[in-house]
Amino acid sequence: MYSQIKKRSGQIVSFNEKKISIAIAKAGKTTGEFDSNEASKLTKKVLICAEKIIKDAIPRIEQIQDIVEDIVLHSAVSGAPAHPWLAYFSSLCSAKHKW
């Protein structure tokens, strides 16, 4: 797994998969689509997918965010329209730029 990630600012920081799980869980809770247990499962899927797709030694946050969106939009947990989730998640990531 990755040890570092490149933020939007260009700063390289330690990679923390927990931040991905927290962001997914917040979005799922806000939209009522899933809980923190499902967020953890989705995070694992994101990490597996990222390892297969991202060949860079240090991935960019945008790359991880794209994978998160794709995994959640195509997962069984979001059987309902995922647009509310996607809108919330995108605003969360764009506003904070911290994960």
Image (tube, rainbow, N blue to C red):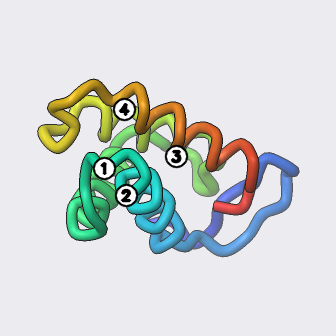
Measuring 48% from the left and 61% from the top, which residue is drawn there?
A: 20
Amino acid type, callout 3: Ile
Q: How far apart are the alpha carbons under marks 1 and 2?
A: 5 Å
Q: Where does residue 77 sit, x and y in percent of width and height? A: 17, 44
Amino acid marked by disc 4: Asp
What's the CA distance linking mark 4 and mark 3? 10 Å
**Residue at the location (26% across, 46% down)?**
33
**Marks 3 and 2, the one that precedes in the sequence:** 2
Q: Which residue is mark 3?
A: 64
Secondary structure beneath label 4: helix
Residue 53 lies, in percent from the top left, at 40, 38
Please provide percent x and percent y for residue 54.
Answer: 48, 42
Q: Is residue 20 above or below residue 92?
A: below
Horizontal side, residue 20 vs residue 59: left or right:
left
Disc 4 versus disc 1: nearer the observer: 1
Of labels 4 and 1, earlier in sequence is 1
